[in-house]
Amino acid sequence: MDKTNKNNNNVIVCKNINKIYQTGDVVTQVLFDVSLHIKKGEFVAITGPSGSGKSTIMHIIGALDSPSSGSYLLDGQDVSKLSDDQLADIRKNKIGFVFQSFNLLKRATVWRNVMLPLVYAETPLADRINLSAKALEAAGLDKDRWFHLSNQLSGGQMQRVAIARALVNNPAIILADEPTGNLDTKTGEFVLETFRRLNKEEGHTIILITHEADVAAHADRVIYIKDGRIADVL
Amino acid sequence: MLLNDLYQETIAAITANKARSGLTILGIVIGIASVISLTAIGQGSQNSITSSIQSIGSNLIMVMPGASRSAGVSGGMGSAESLSLSDMEAIKKNVIGVKAIAPEISKRYQIVAGSANTNTTVLGTNVDYQQVRSLEIESGNFFSESDITASRKVAVIGPTVRDDLFGEGVDPVGQTIKINNNNFKIVGMTKSKGGSSASSQDDQITIPYTVAQKYFTNSKYVGTISISATSEDDITSVQEQATSLLLERHNKTTETADFRIMNQADIVSAASSITETLTMLLAAIAGISLLVGGIGIMNMMLTNVTERTKEIGLRKAIGARRNDISNQFLAEAITLTFLGGVIGIILGWLIAWGITTFASLSASVSWSSILLAFGVSAAIGVIFGYYPARRASKLNPIDALRYE
């Protein structure tokens, strides 16, 4: 295996990651020696039963949490030992999140929701409209919905807004945590198709976290986690 | 985070729950308005007391006779006959820093003019009196030195006396009035000084002291000697010189003195210290309501942080730094108190204005109280907003996103 060549293409490289939680005297190890890499432009699913540690992996990959030991390179940058604010900057510039419960600002318009990451990225005001429109188009939300309040939308539309919000900063990876969990099967299919299209046509790297095997099946590659270890890569 | 974004976020957050924001602001409004209006009342009463004392004269020092005693019964301060015209002449000659000096011989009489009559104070004095008591002439003239030497029966009346005897707006100069069955010719009328106290100089008839001695008291003694010092700095020195001079002339010691000397500054400062205490007390009470308003802000912000935990988690997930979050909540708290402060200042001003206009109490809003109220409301925003903001910024994004 040619390691150097591979590393150049990898957007995510996790090496021997352990995660240990300590509550008082009780020490719980959630991840054991997890190593994985994800290439630029890949569509990967991370799956496993609940309690397997896939959420913890997602938090580490999403720079929401740091590993107890091991290293994590995101887009060539070591992210394993950063402060809270430095992690915030990583999330701001390199990661787009899509959540199960959408997490939109309820009283705000679709526009304002999509622009929110640009607020923290301090993008010049003049560029924001362009970037947001592009992201909304890519996420496939009908133009006549763009100025609605987010709580006037259907679940599928909300998830599209969330996808647009994840895209707007042009991040290195899009991290979708159970994106179809709150949607009916049909709408879920649409959302997964959207991810597929974004991956294929626009070359976005997409990481799908899910416990449903049929959702995971949409990805090119499935990483299966069990009891805090990588059990299988399909 | 750009300032403009911070502003937008703040407006959005405050307008998201208008009723709650409004009620929180109300707490600050009431606090600030009461600080402004109550200190205005305190300040206003202080000003009116000070100015009414100052209107008595300029750099005034008053020498008053001591209490008369007959068989151990005190007749009260000022009742003794211990000050004479020669005392006055001696002060005038020997004390340095005297600008003007006037004797005062006063007694109340029934005054008759035609069919009208009134009871008022008749005061015998010299021409310096006008200067000592800062009297201004509205029409005619003050009596002259020659009126005094010739003991002419001339009188200068106050506007209240004019109103009582001749009616408002009438020029009384040249008219004749009867005081204790002696006819006096009115040569002038003083300008109104305002004030409603019984000893108002508006309700007074001023005549030459020679006339007062000749026709009314028949003695060489005078009631009070009023001295005007050349400047404010001279007051103390004039007072000391006059005291030692009179003690020497009367052959008395400080303990047995048969007179008292007071100056205007003493009276002003005594009155001021009372009203200052009053103002402080009022401000303290108002300050408590401001504090309660501040606690209201903190309470609302804490509720806000809890309610928006999930939103905070999301904001952090998409890249908000700790300071971004805490600035947002702090800006919200400061905006609320700032709004409350502005409305409170306007309201307090209106209350002070209303009190002055409708309640005949003077209230004056000072710039310092506005600045103080403004500063306090901003400080309340920072102090009571800081803890909730800090709490929000320290939320762990993973836990916050899970929060239901």
Image (cartoon, rainbow, N blue to C red):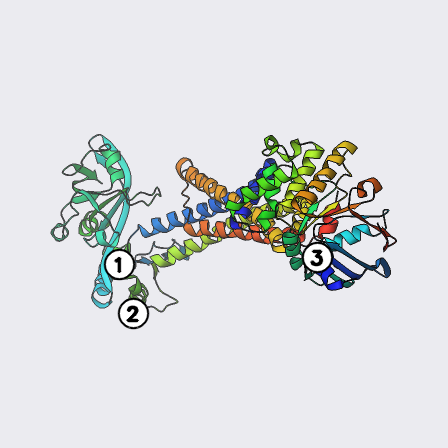
Q: How far is the residue under mark 3 from the one under mark 2?
A: 112 Å
Residue that numbered label 3 is attached to = A9
Q: Which comes before the other along the chain, label 2 or label 1?
A: 1
Identify the image quadrant of the N terminus of chain A.
bottom right
Q: Chain of mark 1?
A: B
Report the residue marked by disc 2. Answer: B248
Foreground label between 3 and 1? 3
**Mark 2 vs mark 1, CA separation in Å:** 22 Å
* Residue with the mark numbered 1: B228
Q: Amino acid at mark 1?
A: Ser
Residue at the (23%, 58%) spot, across then down? B101
Total numbered badges shown on the rendered structure: 3
User: Is A166 situated left or right of A21 in this image?
Assistant: left
Q: Position of residue B237 (x, y in %)?
A: 30, 67
Q: Are marks 3 and 1 in contact (CB under 8 Å)?
A: no
- Packing grade of label 1 (10 A; few <14, some 14-19, many >=20) is many
Please tell me which residue lies in front, A51 or B113: A51
Q: Residue at x 25, y 56 (%)?
A: B221
Q: Local crowd at mark 3 within 10 Å, few (<14), some, or many (≥20)?
A: some
